[in-house]
């Protein structure tokens, strides 16, 4: 039994829950933990040492250990598990208690759960947390959604445990209902796209530039000192020098080229299609993970299908410089697409998102943190109604300044038969977005021809239909 009343409850004492609870304890908040697995409880108590924590597998003891109103965090796998736990908790929860889901739940599930608990006067919050194991322990980026009044009850704690960027906490109430989980979903979509782009740069450097793992470590380390400064570039540099503990050489060369995914990138693409917001770089990143997963089919096709056959050689320093600019261009396009989706979703779902605040809290702690986010934050600060960051004059100049290099990189990849669809989609997005005219008039004519779907004209008002097969 607990010897005192604890400030917060933590349900799920796996790696993320355990580390977040220890982070809370370090900032002066006492935590009672609950987990049905004895080994998780033992690990938590062992890691906690003399900290002011308590853990149990008995739900009654867990609730008795908490001060009222109860403030409980869930860090458990998304999906049915969350609903099962909520059903177990409901008999013990009272009006004005706060229940927080800090996992990667789909935003529509969060809306359903919010409405269900609202009827019982229980505050339910969907809170996105990014930063992985290390972030949870040292300070993540936190994306809370739900009732503003409920947020005020936990605000001080979240600000204390969050990452800090320019001495500002990387947490901000984002909006009602599922706003927090929606923003986290889009964060993960952007994450997918940037990881794909980095992997394409690696592919070109390895096969065209003949770069060794030592070269790759040096290249990415240098890139991280410039405009590409970011968490993902930083860890990529580290990856290339990690030695394999089970055999000789570097570990990267022993890892199977079949990427896994938990679905959040696909969720981003799915909802963007519903809202008719183009996300080609994020979409192709999801697709490429699917292609990587059909490893046996790729092995079979490698024996049948041929490519150009010859890889041209280029000056290594030139290739590195072209790729740096191309990667910068494509990463800007990735952020542009993610924020464009947030802009549309804010209106559709009545989140009333502040995009400047989102850029601000992504500057530290989260997986997609980068120096570029300060430029994005500034753009929204100067123009809160900006629908796409490409429309910002300074960001537009960055894209225009790097377009020569990304076109060169795409040429090199195409000549070598190396798949670089992320770069291709980033450039296609840019070229389409800047095009005053696109050939969609032909598509409209085709639709009207075979399906009588009608069309608009560019010289007259109204809706028109033509009998295309009529005799001339």
Image (tube, grey):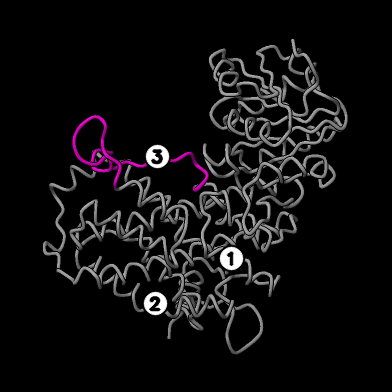
**95, above or below 347, in the image:** above
Is residue 156 or residue 472 the one in the foreground?
Answer: 156
Question: Mark 3 to mark 1: distance in Å?
Answer: 30 Å
As drawn, the residue found furthest toward the top would be 1
- Where residue 167 sits: x, y (%)? 66, 56
Relative vertical location of residue 230 with respect to residue 33 in this rendering, above or below: below
Kind of element beneath mark 2: helix
Indicate the quadrant where residue 12 lies.
top right
> Residue 120: where, in percent of width, then height?
85, 30
Disc 3 marks which residue?
A: 260
Residue that label 1 marks: 374
In front of the other: label 3 or label 1? 1
Badge 1: how crowded within 10 Å, few (<14), some, or many (20+)?
some
Q: What's the CA distance linking mark 1 and mark 2?
A: 22 Å
Is the magenta region chiefly helix, strand or loop?
Answer: loop
User: Quick check: marks 3 and 1 in contact, CB under 8 Å?
Assistant: no
Name which of mark 1 and mark 2 comes first in the sequence: 1
Instruction: Give the image location of residue 213, x and y in percent.
Output: 24, 51
Residue 67 image-quadrant placement = top right
């Amino acid at each position: 039994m607990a010897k005192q009343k604890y400030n917060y409850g933590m349900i799920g004492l796996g790696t993320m829950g355990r580390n977040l609870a220890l982070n809370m304890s370090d900032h002066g908040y006492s935590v009672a933990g609950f987990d049905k697995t004895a080994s998780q409880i033992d690990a938590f108590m062992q890691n906690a040492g003399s900290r002011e924590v308590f853990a149990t597998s008995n739900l009654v003891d867990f609730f008795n250990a908490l001060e009222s109103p109860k403030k409980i965090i869930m860090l458990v796998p998304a999906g049915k598990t969350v609903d099962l736990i909520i059903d177990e908790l409901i008999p013990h929860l009272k009006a004005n208690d706060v229940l927080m889901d800090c996992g990667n739940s789909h935003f529509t599930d969060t809306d359903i759960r919010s409405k269900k608990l609202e009827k019982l006067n229980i505050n339910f919050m969907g809170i996105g947390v990014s930063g992985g194991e290390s972030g949870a322990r040292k300070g993540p980026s936190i994306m809370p959604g739900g009732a503003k009044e409920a947020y005020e009850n936990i605000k001080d704690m979240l600000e204390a445990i969050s990452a800090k960027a320019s001495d500002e906490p990387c947490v901000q109430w984002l909006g009602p209902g599922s706003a927090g989980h929606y923003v986290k979903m889009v964060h993960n979509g952007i994450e997918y796209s940037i990881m794909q782009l980095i992997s394409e740069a690696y592919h070109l450097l390895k096969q065209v530039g003949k770069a060794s793992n030592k070269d790759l470590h040096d290249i990415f380390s240098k890139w991280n000192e410039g405009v590409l400064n970011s968490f993902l570039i930083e860890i990529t540099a580290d990856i290339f020098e990690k030695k394999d503990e089970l055999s000789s050489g570097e570990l990267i060369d022993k890892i199977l080229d079949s990427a896994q995914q938990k679905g959040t990138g696909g969720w981003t693409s799915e909802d963007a299609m519903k809202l008719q917001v183009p996300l080609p770089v994020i979409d192709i990143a999801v697709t490429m993970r699917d292609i990587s997963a059909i490893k046996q089919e790729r092995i079979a096709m490698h024996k049948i299908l041929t490519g150009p056959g010859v890889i041209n050689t280029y000056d290594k320093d030139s290739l590195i410089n072209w790729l740096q600019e191309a990667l910068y261009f494509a990463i800007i396009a990735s952020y542009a697409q993610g924020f464009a989706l947030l802009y549309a979703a804010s209106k559709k779902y009545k989140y009333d998102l502040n995009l400047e605040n989102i850029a601000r809290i992504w500057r530290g702690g989260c997986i997609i943190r980068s120096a570029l986010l300060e430029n994005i934050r500034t753009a929204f600060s100067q123009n809160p109604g900006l629908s796409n960051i490409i429309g910002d004059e300074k960001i537009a100049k960055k894209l225009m300044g790097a377009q020569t290099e990304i076109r060169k990189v795409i040429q090199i990849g195409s000549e070598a038969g190396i798949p670089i669809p992320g770069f291709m989609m980033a450039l296609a997005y840019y070229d389409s977005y800047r095009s005053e005219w696109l050939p969609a008039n032909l598509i409209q004519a085709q639709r009207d021809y075979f399906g009588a779907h009608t069309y608009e004209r560019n010289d007259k008002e109204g809706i028109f239909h033509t009998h295309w097969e009529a005799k001339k």
